[in-house]
Amino acid sequence: MAISISAVKTRYGFIAALMAGVFFTILQFARPAPTIADDKAGSESALRQLRENVRTFTLSNGLRVIMHRRGIAPVFAGLIAVRVGGVDETPGETGISHMLEHMAFKGTPQIGTKNYSKEAPLLDELESLAQKESNGIKLSEEEKERLSAIYDELKKVWIVGDYSVQYERRGASGMNATTSKEITNYFVNLPRSAFEFWCWAESERLLNPVMRQFYQERDVVMEERRMRSEDDPEGKLYEMMLGVAYLKHPYRNPVIGYPEDLQRLTATMTEKFHRKYYVPANMVISLVGDVIPERDLPFVERYFGRIPVGPVPPRPSIVEGDLHGERRINLEREASPVITIAYPKPNYPHPDDAPISMMGEILVGSRVSPVYTELVKKRKVASQVDYSEGPGVSYPNLMFFSITPNRPHSNEEVLNEFDKVIEKFRRRVVSDQELAIAKRSIAMDYLGHLQSNMSLARDFASSELLYSKWDASLDWYDEAMKVTVKDVERVADQYLRPNHRVIGTISNVNSSAKSSDRAGASGLSSSGES
Amino acid sequence: MVGEKGSKSSVAAFLAVVIATLLMLSGCSSGAAGRSAVIPPPPEVDLDEYEQQAPQSWQLANGMTVYFLYDEEIPILRGTFYIPGGTLWEPQELPGALQVMGQQMRQGGAGELSADELDLELEKLAAAIGTEYGSEFGTISFSCLSSDAPRVLSLVADVVRNPRFQQDRLELWKGQAFESIKRRRDDPNTVASLAFKQLVYGDTPLGQVLVAEDVRRIDRIDLLRLHRQFVKPAGSALAITGKISRRELEEILEKNFSGWGGVSPALGELPEINMKAEPGVYFIQLPFSQSTVYLGHLGPQRLSSDHIAIEGFNTIFGGGDFGSRLMKRIRTELGLVYAIFGGVIPGFPVGQAVMVLQTKSESTAPAIVESLDVLSDMKDGVLDQAELEQARKSIKNSFIFRLDTPDDLVRRTVLLKLLKYPKDYDLTYLGKVSAMTPEEIKAVAQSRWHPDKMVAVVVGNETAYNALKEDILARPDKYPMGGLKRCTFDQRLRSCS
């Protein structure tokens, strides 16, 4: 599944989301996968120390700041989280929070331009022409010429890439931003020497991002959309499944936006969106690494304190109704078969959230888990099984079981085998050993994430932003460690209902053409490649 | 020495809170006053020298070296064990066998434990062991709770010394491999990168792309034989960090590894790697809305005389983030791509010079031509001091991120050793970066890139093919690698015409 997991519950949905980011790294030099669990006393003391050492402050304008000193080198992770994302978008403007995230890399009146007073009127004129075009009005020949002349003028004052260049020369590493259903994150690792610069540059763009190169960037986002959704069968399937799982709730819309909406976005709309959502009380600053409040906080106040106060925009309160049965959707594509089964679940802080994640870990999380053992090792109908939660963290969401069928087995066969495992699991007793293995695995992941400045920074910021509690993930972890066998049995019975789920499949166009027993209107392909 | 850190930092943290609380009070008044004032950028500051921890190191009698850094932050132990020798030296008649052997060391059971028992044991401990063989060495990485170190390191030793290579697990792996080979066509980047690898490295271990037939041919007997031949202690190195005392670690390692002996294999001659593929545009038609393009050719060996200038070149050309010329031109100014990269990637015994991009079908031709133009500008255009200074600073100031965690630091120490970097490499590195000149960077552009010898792999749809064909006909001078060929991709790149 194209779900990139971040922050808190590493493998689980706590802060998991389909992320659309500003930058994509093609060459990734992978590190060996971290894992591991709990030396009871040792891990408890590590977590206690964390609670004791983290410091929180509120600036004069209401902006919250979280600081945690750790690590062996004079570096820090700086992250700004804004409580805005896909769920805040109204119909017709999907993709706008992500578009704004991209625009935040274009600079400010002080960054990215040789002469802002010359640039600003040109941008205004360009915008009036661009708005016309976005409204479907054809530009006259004269206007077209003027547009091209404006671009020529602008190119003379623009310093392309300046925002990033200034960061890079100060040693920035892993600078990026992501937008999810609920949060937009801006983050970078820097040497300690660049701390004041970070305060300046970040506050600059939160305060006054300039919408330069907006229409070129809209094309860049269209390319990103092609890569993540149009050309990635599983990305496309995920988007389609959300569209049938949610009929009313904004979780149904892709964070990256529908192509028709993207084509209509303008700089003016995006600026308005920025003014509404980028207010101090709607943001959190998170700093982890070589940071010391007595030394560093005055800089934070000096630069970020200038962001003007504004009202916290309300979040939508739309309640998605019951599924009323099983919903199926199929992606017809010349691609290998895939089946994903999604069950609705409540979200944190609902008390069932932790037991459900524990159940997911028991069912799929290890090489000794029932779904893996039965489908991959014994029956060999699948080559891979995955569990994740999404698409967001603030509203009731879904648990996803994604399965890669092994040829010649069809999606339908895989589903039959999967259902057998789930039905058996719901009827039987969960063993103490199964629960213990799952807990240790979650504990190990959790401990592992304490070793990364960035991972901690993201965790604190998301927790504070969504639950007004920087240590909400620690609370979640405590809850998870208290889950009992009875809890798991109860949530299995309550949430893994066969007539209460969404099933998404990918079927191969070529092979289904040959197959006579298609599953018909339900759209579930019964064909496999032989 | 390291153990004292904790107490000091908690005192500092306590003081910090007291002082910071006071600061906050004053902050309130000043913040409200000067809010929307324009503040100019702060002065530029470079990172001062800082004291870096050094791993401890010792050798076992059998030739295995240990590099250890104590880290008490959380009770986890992490290790990576490197064993020299890799697919570069594997038997030619059995492609892929060494990779499979590496993977099956962990999967097929070890010592007293069957595969299922080993899985269960590791799950109970919440420990992880991963094994693999790359082109130059094998790696065994592991992690566990510090308190489980004795047990987990004995399991690591079994995986290394006594893997069982159970037949049923080999079969399970084969089934998964067949499936993933068939799924290659679902992902344009997989198709393009594999085809590029084949064309550049040809019929050598580096150009190897396994197909079902290769997988089918591998037997358990081969795995046993390769294990006997390759997995030896001499020259091996273990990088390890965590909350464990050196004395305890030494004891555990002595107990589990000292009896492990054997002579390291004479690795034999390195294969000769020349690019045999004809230059040209190799088109693979698949129904994607974006074209995925890889273009380039062979590149230099690691530590070539111009290796520092190569880093400078990459930063300026297309290896950095948004600040690189490719990013600025092709993405920011033209809006043609979301993802683009270009750079010289040194390797062993050879590397590659490669540009990678993805763009909508309609803009396939302009994206390629514009990217090549950015490259020719690196060769012939102006490279001013400011741009060079930018690259120098960016490399110098970000250097610290190569060793900012205990795990990074200790693994880097081992890798530099294993890859035979000079002893003072890191110490002299920043000085060399400062000394880099524009001429040296231009020389990289001129000597390491040859557009007329490039292969350009393009994976895209019919629209992309037609547009590209038309553009090549219209302005052949823009495509110095020459003509357009259509290729088929079935598990791997097949025929081209």
Image (cartoon, coloured by chain):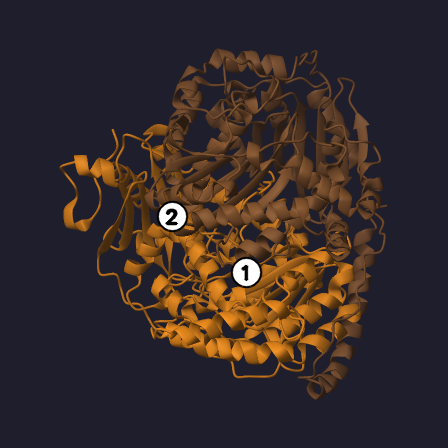
Chain colours: A orange, B brown
Name the side, left or right, on which B351 lies relative to A526: right
C-alpha separation, residue under disc 1 versus residue under disc 2? 24 Å
Q: Do circles 1 and 2 both sit on a common chain? A: no
Q: Where, quadrant-wise, is the C terminus of chain B in this rendering? A: top left
> What kind of element bears circle 2?
loop
Q: Quadrant of residue A308?
A: bottom right
Which residue occupies the foreground of this view, B282 or A310? Answer: B282
Categorize mark 1 by other alpha carbons within 10 Å: few (<14), some (14-19), many (20+): some
Task: Name the chain letter of the residue that bears numbered label 2.
Answer: A
Judge whether A204 appears above or below B371 on screen. Answer: below
Identified by mark 1, the residue type is: Glu
**Which residue is denoted by mark 2 in the rendering?**
A231
**Which residue is denoted by mark 1 in the rendering?**
B333
Residue at 47 percent across and 62 percent down: it is A180
Identified by mark 2, the residue type is: Asp
Q: Where, quadrant-wise, is the N terminus of chain B in this rendering? A: top right
Name the side, left or right, on which B399 lies relative to A187: right
Q: Which mark is residue B110?
A: none
